[in-house]
């Protein structure tokens, strides 16, 4: 398979200069149009660093 096309968009909903959300879009081209995809495994890794001490409650969700 050809490598996927990956696009990321960062969003600052409240316009405070701190990013609130990242949207990741992954598109792939099937080798044949007749191919029926039954399963795809996707692994996402995130590396982030906090600059200040804060109280934080974090929840994560990946929708695929």
Image (tube, helix red, strand yellow):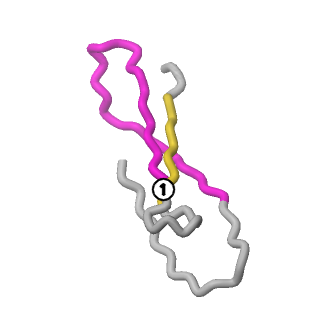
Q: Residue at x 54, y 25 (%)?
A: 3
| Horizontal arrangement in the rendering, residue 49 relative to residue 4 (left or right) | right
Image: 5 above or below 15: above
Q: Position of residue 52 (x, y in %)?
A: 71, 79
| Horizontal arrangement in the rendering, residue 34 relative to residue 32 (left or right) | left
Front position in the image: 18 or 57: 18
Q: Residue at x 48, y 20 (%)?
A: 1
Q: Which residue is mark 1?
A: 11
Front position in the image: 60 or 9: 9
Q: Which residues are magenta?
A: 22-47
Whether 32 is among the magenta residues is yes
Image: 57 above or below 9: below
Q: Position of residue 9 (x, y in %)?
A: 49, 46
SS at mark 1 in the image = strand
10 Å neighbourhood of mark 1: few (<14), some, or many (≥20)?
Answer: some
Image: 25 above or below 4: below
Whether 57 is among the magenta residues is no
Q: Which quadrant holds residue 19? A: bottom right
């Amino acid at each position: 398979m050809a490598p996927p096309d990956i696009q990321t968009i960062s969003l600052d909903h409240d316009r405070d200069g701190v990013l609130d959300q990242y949207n990741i879009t992954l598109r792939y081209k099937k080798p044949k149009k007749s191919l029926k995809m039954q399963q795809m495994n996707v692994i996402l890794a995130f590396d982030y660093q906090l600059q200040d001490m804060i109280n934080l409650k974090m929840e994560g969700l990946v929708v695929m």
